[in-house]
Structure formats: structure tokens, C-alpha cells
Amino acid sequence: QVQLVESGGGLVQPGGSLRLSCAASGSISSFAAMGWYRQAPGKQREFVARFTSDGKTDYTDSVKGRFTISRDNAKNTVTLQMNSLEPEDTAVYYCYVRKSTFLAVDYWGQGTQVTVHS
């Protein structure tokens, strides 16, 4: 079992920045994938960004060039730096981990609210 603790959400004006962090109980370098989804009210959960075990990153098109995911293996933490935030980015952001490429079992954090509003 993996425990995930998210932090960094809050209220920011359009064009502003936030940094989300997710600390995992375990060595994140051993995970098949680790990253972020988000869910806005009335919407489906949407993939945002991830690290895969080979060190590659992946982003949904709407955040490319604005969001950057990074990893600190020593601290077992992934960070999502969000710049040029837009009202459409408003959502609850969830950290997730897939431990194994061969088992489709994911672990999720509690979520952190990001609100982009004037």
C-alpha cells in the first residue's frame, strides 16, 4: 500500500503560479508511474502530467508549456509547477501512483483544491 500526501493548493489569480507537491511512502524511483490528475465539478477526471519509470514525462495538451512535473527521489516527492494559470485549471488535483507496469492498481491522494479566479 502507498500513502500519498498532497500540498500546495490554493487560490491564485489568472496568470499566477502555484506549486503542488506529493510525498509518497516508498521509493518513487521504483514506481511505474507517478503524477497528477484533476477533476472539475461536473467533469470527468482528467490526466494532467506524469513521470514514468524510465524518467520520461507526459502532459495533457492543455497544460503543455505551462506546467512542469519534477521528481526528487531522495525525498520521494513529485512536484507540479503550474505557471500561467487559467480559470479552466480550477479543479481538485489528485496525486497518483502506479506501482507496477504489470498490475493495473493505482493509489490516490486525498486531493488539493486549486482555484484560479480574479
Image: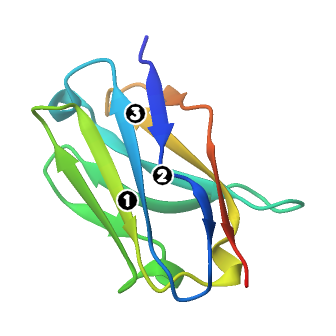
Q: Residue at x 34, y 66 (%)?
A: 58
Q: Which amino acid lies under the numbered mark 3 shown in the image of this protein?
A: Arg
CB atoms at circles 3 and 2 under 8 Å apart? no
Residue situated furthest left in the rendering: 74
Residue situated furthest right in the rendering: 42
Residue 25: give x, y in percent of width and height.
Answer: 32, 18
Residue 80: give x, y in percent of width and height.
Answer: 37, 59
Viewer-nearest of labels 3 and 2? 2
Please give the residue where the numbered disc 3 appears in the rendered image: 98
Earlier residue among tags 3 and 1: 1
Name the image quarter holding residue 108.
top right
Name the image quarter holding residue 76.
top left
Determine which of the numbered discs, if any, sits on residue 26 in the image: none
Please give the residue where the numbered disc 1 appears in the rendered image: 80
87 on left or right of 75: right
Quick one: SS at disc 2? strand
Image height of 32 relative to 62, above or below: above
Q: Which amino acid lies under the numbered mark 1 shown in the image of this protein?
A: Leu
The residues tagged by marks 3 and 1 sit, at their Cα atoms, a distance apart of 17 Å
Q: Which amino acid lies under the numbered mark 2 shown in the image of this protein?
A: Trp
Residue 118: give x, y in percent of width and height.
Answer: 73, 85
Q: Residue at x 70, y 61 (%)?
A: 91
Please give the residue where the numbered disc 2 appears in the rendered image: 36
Quick one: SS at disc 1? strand
- Identify which residue, 112 or 104, lies in the foreground: 112
